[in-house]
Image (tube, helix red, strand yellow):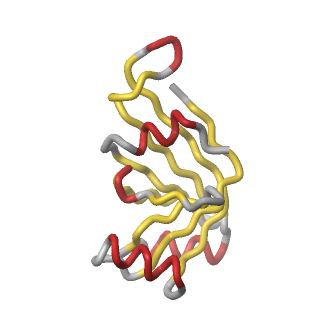
Amino acid sequence: MLSEKFFEVLTHEGVVSIVTWNTEEAHVVNTWNSYLVVTPDQRILIPAYAMHRTEKNLTLHNKVKLTLGSREVLGYKDYQGTGFLVEGTGKFLASGPEFDMMKEKFSFLTRVLEITVAKAKQML
């Protein structure tokens, strides 16, 4: 599901926007491309320090969208820069082997946001 171009984007730094929502409005938090870890089964793990509203929203509605990109990766028709919209479901991990692995990489985290990807679309 996640393309080679998606993984190429992850090799370059850029902003990742994570969108969740509740009954009233959308909420957006940001992180960095370099913080995303993709598991062999293509779930995305993201270290979380704050993200309290994100976590609360996911308990109400587990859908999540994220966008990411890089100006360094060629997009469609050889235009400079590309980006992705990823849609899926999310939950927070506070223990377990994947939490421990992420804690070794990112000592600041208090939890891990796990995204199970349903769809990933190249946008640029």
Q: Is residue 40 left or right of residue 51?
A: right
Q: Quadrant of residue 89?
A: bottom right
Q: How many marks?
A: 0
* Residue at the (71%, 52%) spot, across then down: 118
Residue 107, position in %: x, y? Answer: 29, 77
Q: Quadrant of residue 14?
A: top left
Residue 30, position in %: x, y? Answer: 37, 56
Farthest-out residue, top: 77
Looking at the picture, tell me which residue is in the foreground, 110 or 8: 8
The image shows residue 102, relative to residue 15, as above or below, that is below
Farthest-out residue, right: 118
* Residue at the (68%, 46%) spot, across then down: 119
Residue 98, position in %: x, y? Answer: 51, 77
The image shows residue 104, relative to residue 41, as above or below, that is below
Residue 112, position in %: x, y? Answer: 47, 74
Farthest-out residue, front: 40
Looking at the figure, which quarter contains the N terminus? Answer: top right
Farthest-out residue, bottom: 95
Q: Quadrant of residue 2?
A: top right
Looking at the picture, tell me which residue is in the foreground, 2 or 87: 2
Looking at the picture, tell me which residue is in the foreground, 97 or 93: 97
The image shows residue 81, relative to residue 119, as above or below, that is above
* Residue at the (56%, 61%) spot, across then down: 39
* Residue at the (59%, 73%) spot, across then down: 91
Q: Is residue 57 left or right of residue 15?
A: right
